[in-house]
Amino acid sequence: MKGKLIWSIFWAMVGVFVIAIGMMFIPPLGRLQMRFSGFPAWVVLTGLGVTLIVLTVKTKVGGMLKKFLLLTGASAVGLPVFAVLHNMVSGLFNIEEPFFFIIATIVCPIGFLVGVVSSIVLAVKTKPSVPAETS
């Protein structure tokens, strides 16, 4: 049961990530976001990321798949966390702070994409093959 739940959370995270990126870069989706007073995509993404991390650690997922699932979850959690840290440091100290900004805008999305693609590849590669029917 938990294995199916991990993959459900995983695919929900991928969907929310695509919606969140779409809201930032596709103007009609951005206007739709404003009309509905904002879709809390980053809050949902963070919650799904934490859930994926907890489920991956608690279940018997092993090997490289476990590492890539943890990378996916940690990157999803890191996006809003480092964005907020960047804004807090910039606002509190009245300086332009590049470290957290680069992590939030470059490192975390790349980590997320690497984790997603690698998890999918490993899941497909290790999936047991269906035996052929004998006549």
Image (cartoon, helix red, strand yellow):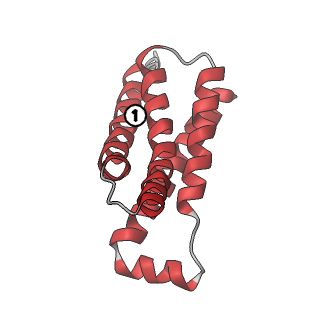
Residue under the point 49% across and 81% down = 32
In the displayed structure, would residue 18 be above or below residue 107? below
How many tags in the picture?
1
Left or right side of 88 for 47: right
In the rendered image, residue 128, in percent from the top left (x then y), is placed at 46, 18
Q: 34 or 118, which lies in front?
A: 34
In the displayed structure, would residue 7 be above or below residue 89? above
Q: The disc labelled 1 sits on which kind of residue? A: Ile
Residue 127 visible in the current orientation: no
In the rendered image, residue 95, in percent from the top left (x then y), is placed at 35, 60
Q: 111 or 15, which lies in front?
A: 111
Image quadrant holding the N terminus, namely top right
Residue 77 visible in the current orientation: yes
> Quick one: label 1, few (<14), some, or many (20+) residues within 10 Å?
some
Q: 87 or 49, which lies in front?
A: 87
Residue under the point 36% across and 80% down = 27
In the rendered image, residue 5, in percent from the top left (x then y), is placed at 64, 36
Left or right side of 94 for 2: right
In the displayed structure, would residue 75 be above or below residue 122? below
Residue underneath mark 1: 120
Residue under the point 43% across and 27% down = 123
In the rendered image, residue 101, in percent from the top left (x then y), is placed at 35, 53
